Image: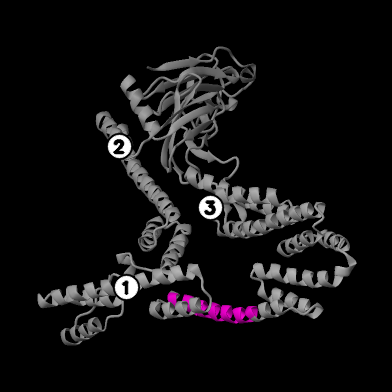
Amino acid sequence: MHRKIFRAFTLFTVLSLTSSALAASPIVVNGEAHIGDQTVLSVETSQIPAGGSVEWSVSPTTGKTPDRISLRAGGLECAFTPLDTEPIRVIASFTNSRGEVVSTSETLITPKEFEINIAVVVDKPLTLWNAERRSNYVLSPDVLMADTPVKLRAVLEPDFKGEHTLQWTADGATALLSADADDIFIKRTFVGESEIYVSAFNSSGTKLGSGESTVSITLPVSTFVESSNNREAWQGWQRAQELWESKNYSEAVELANRAATLSPRDAEIADGLRAMMTNYTRFTRAQKLREDALNFDAEGKFDDALRNLRAAQVIWALDDAPEKIKAEEMKVNEQRLLQQSANWLRDTASAYDNENMYEEALEYYGKSLAVMSSDAVADRMDKIQKRLELIADADRYAGEGSTLEREGKLQDALNHYTASVMSNPDATLRQHIEELQSVISRRERQSNALYREGQDFQRKNRLQEALTRYHESVNVWENENARQRIQQLSRNRGLAPDPDLRGPEDFGIGTRAEAQKFTKEADELYAEGKLDECLELYRKALRIAPNQELQKWAAHIFDIVKERDSAAAANKQIKEANALYRAGKVKEALDLYRQSLTTHKNPEIEEFLKKQVQN
């Protein structure tokens, strides 16, 4: 359709011009033309003959006729709104006072769509807790958390001056939340990529343009929750220490227990809590002794009261205890002062003795003897001296045995442990000796079994398999026969060992030290995010030494790995379904969306499918 727009009136400024006919200059376009936005074209007054006027002609070449075509500035400007991207021809005809066209100017305008950029708006970056440095650290703005609203903003390029509306869409795995002007909130329940699309329309419903973006959700909610728990646990532990220093012991223990519950794998909190509980047990024992001393004093049993106060002070010293002890001493008869002095020293020594604080006990027994001779005290001091010598020997043997065990020298370690319990009987160490003897016996049996398997393979001329079994026999336990066979096969046959040889842990045979080593290595891998590798080491540790707490933790890691893998597989299916859906292959897309739900549950996909059924 060809539409002409004529000037409705004559500009007085034009009538005053004296030029009769001037050459036409190009029509001036005020800025780039964009769909849905008013485009303004103009000519200079110098182009209009005296008494003349300008006539405008606006016509599309192949597309829609522009909207709201009007004249402005007395006809010197022509304004209209393009409705598509097809070229528009604009002609300005200049007439003289007699209405004769003396010249024309023509231009071809090709409107563009507005570019729409989608940006993630981060009002406040996420903060996690660094358990090693004990401080918060701010994540980079591109780290977004799952199951949390993410704010997006659409920006039109160039800026659109008029009123406009936006229409947002997203892939099936992403929920669109409330929108406000150019901003919208999305949410995805698990990590993955959200595909976001937006289209802009002016007040007349004309589409201005569209844009799309992929938003990566990379931080699971579980990681953020664990970080918050660790932060709260550490702050609680620090407050517990402050309470302890201010002698609010009960409150300190309660808060410390809560901190350990929030972060059960924080070794510093766990070790600190154990030490605090040990001291708290001593404190409560001392408090009980003081209460009993008060009752004895009320009954007139001053000797018993004094004994309890002194024992309490050894177990847990208080600032007011010396005064209480002194006051109790003053109640004792003057004739018994000498005896009481000896008794005080002996009782203090006995309290240290009962706490296995032998050096302090010897010191006070000696002071007691200096006040008053006692064969019983002298005999006890002699026994303590011998006991200290035995304990020193036992500690030395046990320490050397522990070092040998860590080096894998189990038989030597067993000999040292045995020497230790002979010097100082220790039920825990005896139990460890029995466990170590069982491990050695099992390794010997397994080594012999592997050696026999190697012999069987060698008789069948399966020499490589035989060599592997001989090497594994030596790995499990020293086997001289297996070593000789290895030398023979390596020298005569030129065979090399299999690089993947099994060790004791592969047969579930190991010591607690080895299990602890695997656990420590697994913990380090977990801290590095290497879940598959750490899970295998946890399993090795559990095969050696079953542990209910570690079993639960390994199961937790397995669930995380399983969840991660299933979510990743579902994400891949959803992405393929999205592509099918956009390509118009709705049935194939819906089938693939349903298949993704069997791989990993997704509320947004379920809701999306439900709407598809309703439509």
Residue tagged 1: 441
Q: Are marks 1 and 3 in contact (CB under 8 Å)?
A: no
Which of the two discs, 1 and 3, sits closer to the camera?
1
| 10 Å crowding of disc 2: few (<14), some (14-19), many (20+) | few
Residue tagged 3: 264
Identity, as a three-letter code, of the amino acid under mark 1:
Ser
Residue tagged 2: 598
Identity, as a three-letter code, of the amino acid under mark 2:
Thr
Locate residue 424 relative to residue 174 in the image: left or right: right
The residue range painted magenta reads 383-405
- Residue lying farthest front? 335
Identity, as a three-letter code, of the amino acid under mark 3:
Pro
Which of the two discs, 1 and 2, sits closer to the camera?
1
Q: Position of residue 476 (x, y in %)?
A: 30, 74
What quarter of the picture does the C terminus occupy?
top left
For marks 1 and 3 on the same chain, the one whose residue lies earlier in the sequence = 3
Q: Position of residue 359 (x, y in %)?
A: 68, 76
Residue situated in front as seen by the camera: 358 or 532: 358
Q: Give me the residue at 47% from left, 41% from top.
A: 146
| 10 Å crowding of disc 3: few (<14), some (14-19), many (20+) | some
Residue 487 inside the magenta-drawn segment:
no
Question: In this view of the protein, can residue 142 be seen by the observer?
Answer: no
Real-space Cα separation, disc 2 to disc 3, in angstroms: 34 Å
Q: Position of residue 364 (x, y in %)?
A: 75, 75
Question: In this view of the protein, can residue 485 be seen by the observer?
Answer: yes
Q: Position of residue 77 (x, y in %)?
A: 55, 23
Residue situated in front as seen by the camera: 591 or 107: 591
Locate residue 270 relative to residue 421 in the image: left or right: right
